[in-house]
Image (spheres, helix red, strand yellow):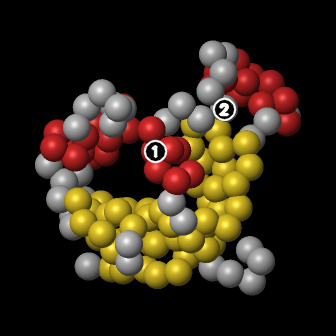
Amino acid sequence: IWEKPACTVYVRESRYTKEFIDNHECFSLNFLKDGNRSTLNLLGSQSGRELDKMGASGLTPTFVDGCPSFEEAELVLVCKKIYSVPLPVENLLDKRLVDANYASGDPHVQYIGEIVAAYHS
């Protein structure tokens, strides 16, 4: 998009991750090697506000080009934020999605990041 290699991510307003994305110029996408399903389940179901997710996950935090990453990642995309916008629930064409995903509020924010580097192990 906009003549740049890019990726799009969606993060709920309430997520601790959103604070990190909002407060930094870049973010990274980490694709873990096979065999990490339970780790991904832990990371996706617990909040870093209440749990030391890095300690509990067994992953090894590191930095790649100034962005947080994990040594166990098979692929890391380093992205520079270039766009963000809240996703208005009223724009959902299938209203069943509103009931199923936003009954208690907590909408998503869309971020577009320019992929500035990619690392494969």
* Residue shown at 22% from the left, 38% from the top: 52
Residue highlighted by disc 1: 17
- The image quadrant that residue 11 belongs to is top right
Provide residue 82's location: percent of width, then percent of height: 67, 67
For disc 1, the neighbor class at 10 Å (few under 14, some 14 to 19, many from 20) is some
> Comparing marks 1 and 2, which lies closer to the viewer?
1
Q: How far is mark 1 from mark 2, CA to CA? A: 14 Å
| Residue 7 in view | no
- Label 1 element class: helix
Is residue 17 shown above or below 9?
above
| Residue 103 in view | yes
- Label 2 element class: loop
Q: Which mark is residue 37?
A: none
| Viewer-side residue, 61 vs 45 | 61
| Viewer-side residue, 81 vs 112 | 81
Provide residue 35's location: percent of width, then percent of height: 20, 54
Quick check: 81 left or right of 43? right
* Residue shown at 46% from the left, 45% from the top: 17
Amino acid type of the residue tagged 1 in the rendering: Thr
Is residue 90 shown above or below 28?
above
* Residue shown at 63% from the left, 79% from the top: 5
- The image quadrant that residue 105 belongs to is top right
**Image quadrant in which the N terminus is located:** bottom right
* Residue shown at 33% from the left, 74% from the top: 64
Quick check: 38 left or right of 5? left
Quick check: 36 left or right of 46? left
Q: Earlier in the sequence, mark 1 or mark 2?
A: 1
Provide residue 45's location: percent of width, then percent of height: 36, 31
- The image quadrant that residue 69 belongs to is bottom left
Provide residue 53's location: percent of width, then percent of height: 25, 40
Residue highlighted by disc 2: 107
Amino acid type of the residue tagged 2 in the rendering: Pro
